[in-house]
Image (cartoon, coloured by chain):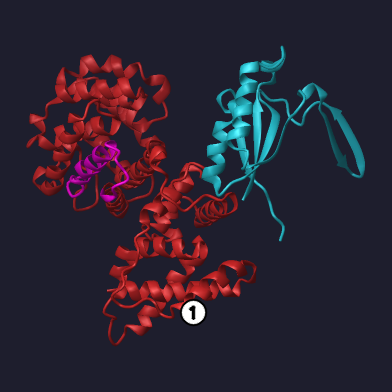
Chain colours: A red, B cyan
């Protein structure tokens, strides 16, 4: 039960504590202490309102810490005066305030480095440990710890406020939060490095935070629906994307009965709403592409022409070689490999170091019967792939090719 | 908190003097944020700058600014703001923000 509370309530409890004591580190350490105390205190019986117990206990511990820090005497004096006036205010029925929106906007403040925004979001809102975040992003734990320390001290030293930005600033600030959620999701979904192909927890956390953000009335950004749809539609395929041995399965070969229908339905409804609100942004178009795949019961039913058209629009909005590469794949399926090869070749300069460019080109060559050239391309892709599961997949394809 | 707003812009813009319209904008900015602004000055161009450093006890004086860059420090405001967001808001209202950039630095307090 304590483990579940830690997972589900950490972000909310921490967001309220930071608001109460005004310091990230003190709040974090106090909350950790409170959970440790719970393990001992709840051995016989858990309190009626565990969340309020944890909050009240952590708040006490935080104030203790602040008292000990003589430097912060002013803050502590104010807090302990308040404390004495209302000894043990954390009555069991009292609910803990939810300040997660303040927390997420502070973590995703533009004054923090983007990689620090992602790390700090995972640390504070999702309760991931520094080691877990370091592993997810494949950096040494010491590097990640330093990144977090720097971010927290910048919040303190530069005076980054703990607040939801005013309405007129939301159109600039909300996209930063969405970008962080998108990064968290992507890191979980494609796990660029490391051995497991999918880091489910990261995907699940990104979806949870997107839902949270959506439920908050001051965030009216329509692209948020599209972002949530995009994440749900990709996440729906998680069980089919790897086989029992953890190896990667291509979209065309996936067992589509394993796709999560509930997530697909929710995602499709959201994307329809987002598309109706013209003009669609990049998240909406990406979600629409995922929806076309999700709607095909069998791979050969996929409406590739529509996917190619959606990639056209995405490319017009966000010209990028990776989008162009995906568009070429859709063209190869809608028209044929001979139509797609020149499109892929055009991208050789910007994408020479990208393993999927080599893999895509090799696949087209194979379909055109140019086996030797294809094999060379698969070799190159293999060299450039960092993810273990993906490497094994490419190696297998290479073996199949040479048979 | 106190913040120093450092105004960086290409000083070539002022080779032929200051644009009166822009000067009026600075006047309006000063009025709008008069309460927050504690101090502020424009600097003479970097051609008038001299850099001094002491190494091994010897003073080395060189002509010119600390670094040759596309944008130069052209002036500053010292302001009092509630937090970084307010400082960024005020910084964004400096006319030069449209041509160059404003570096926002919290002032260190030694307690």
Q: Which residue is mark 1?
A: A84
> Would residue A388 be counted in the magenta stretch?
no
Count of numbered labels shown in the rendering: 1
Q: Nearer the viewer, residue B82 or A39?
A: B82
Q: Position of residue A265 (x, y in %)?
A: 11, 43
Residue at mark 1: chain:
A
Q: Position of residue A153 (x, y in %)?
A: 57, 55
Q: Position of residue A81 (x, y in %)?
A: 52, 75
Outermost residue toward the right in this view: B58
Q: Which residues are magenta?
A: A215-241
Q: Residue at x 25, y 24 (%)?
A: A311
Q: Residue at x 26, y 36 (%)?
A: A222
Q: Is residue A402 visible?
A: no
Could you tell me which quadrant the N terminus of chain A lies in?
Answer: bottom left
User: Measured along the vertical axis of the image, is residue A238 above or below residue B61?
Assistant: below
Disc 1 crowd, CA 10 A, few/some/many (<14, 14-19, 20+): few
Q: Position of residue A149 (x, y in %)?
A: 54, 56
Outermost residue toward the bottom in this view: A44
Q: Nearer the viewer, residue A166 or A246?
A: A166
User: Measured along the vertical axis of the image, is residue A182 above or below residue B30?
Assistant: below
Q: Residue at x 69, y 17 (%)?
A: B18
Quadrant in the picture for residue B8: top right
Query: Is A144 situated left or right of B100 in this image?
Result: left
Quadrant in the picture for residue A264: top left
Q: Nearer the viewer, residue B22 or A47?
A: B22
> Would residue A230 be counted in the magenta stretch?
yes
Q: Is residue B37 visible?
A: yes
Outermost residue toward the top in this view: B16
Helix, strand or loop under label 1: helix
Could you tell me which quadrant the C terminus of chain A lies in?
Answer: top left
């Amino acid at each position: 039960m304590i483990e579940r509370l830690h997972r589900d309530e950490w972000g909310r409890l921490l967001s309220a504590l930071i608001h109460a004591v005004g310091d990230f580190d003190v709040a974090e350490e106090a909350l950790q202490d409170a959970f440790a105390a719970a393990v001992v205190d709840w051995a016989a019986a858990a309190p009626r309102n565990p969340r309020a117990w944890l909050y009240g206990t952590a708040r006490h511990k935080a104030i203790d810490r602040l008292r000990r820090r003589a430097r912060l005497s002013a803050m502590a004096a104010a807090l302990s005066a308040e404390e004495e006036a209302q000894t043990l205010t954390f009555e069991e029925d009292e609910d803990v305030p939810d300040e997660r929106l303040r927390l997420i906007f502070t973590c995703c403040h533009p004054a923090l480095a983007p990689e620090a925004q992602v790390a700090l979001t995972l640390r504070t809102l999702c309760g991931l440990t520094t080691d877990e975040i370091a592993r997810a992003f494949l950096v040494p734990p010491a590097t990640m710890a330093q990144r977090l320390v720097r971010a927290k001290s910048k919040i303190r030293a530069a005076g980054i406020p703990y607040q939801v930005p005013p309405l007129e600033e939301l159109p600039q600030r909300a996209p930063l939060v969405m970008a962080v959620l998108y990064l968290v999701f992507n890191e979980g979904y494609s796990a660029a490095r490391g051995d497991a192909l999918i880091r489910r927890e990261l995907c699940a956390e990104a979806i949870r935070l997107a839902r949270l953000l959506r439920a908050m009335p001051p965030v009216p950004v329509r692209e948020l629906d599209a972002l949530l749809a995009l994440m749900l539609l990709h996440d729906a395929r998680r069980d089919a994307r790897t086989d029992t041995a953890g190896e990667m399965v291509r979209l065309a070969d996936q067992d589509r009965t394993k796709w999560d229908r509930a997530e697909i339905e929710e995602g499709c409804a959201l994307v329809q709403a987002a598309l109706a609100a013209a003009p669609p942004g990049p998240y909406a178009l990406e979600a629409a592409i995922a929806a076309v795949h999700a709607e095909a019961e069998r791979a050969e039913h996929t409406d590739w022409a529509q996917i190619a058209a959606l990639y056209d629009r995405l490319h017009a909005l966000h010209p990028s070689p990776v989008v162009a590469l995906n568009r070429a794949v859709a063209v190869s399926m809608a028209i044929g490999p001979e139509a797609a090869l020149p499109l892929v070749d055009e991208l050789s300069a910007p994408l020479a170091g990208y393993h999927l460019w080599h893999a895509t080109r090799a696949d087209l060559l194979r379909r055109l019967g140019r086996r030797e050239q294809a094999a060379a391309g698969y070799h190159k892709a293999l060299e450039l792939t960092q993810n273990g599961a993906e490497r094994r997949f490419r190696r297998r394809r290479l073996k199949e090719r040479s048979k | 908190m106190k913040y120093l707003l450092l105004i960086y812009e290409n000083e070539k813009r002022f080779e032929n003097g200051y644009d009166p319209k822009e000067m009026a904008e600075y006047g309006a900015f000063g009025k709008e944020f008069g309460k927050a602004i504690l101090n502020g000055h424009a600097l003479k161009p970097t051609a008038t700058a001299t850099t001094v450093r002491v190494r091994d006890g010897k003073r080395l004086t060189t002509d010119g600014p600390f670094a040759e860059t596309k944008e130069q420090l052209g002036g500053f405001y010292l302001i009092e703001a509630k937090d970084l967001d307010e400082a960024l808001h005020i910084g964004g209202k400096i006319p030069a923000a449209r041509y160059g950039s404003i570096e926002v630095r919290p002032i260190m307090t030694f307690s």
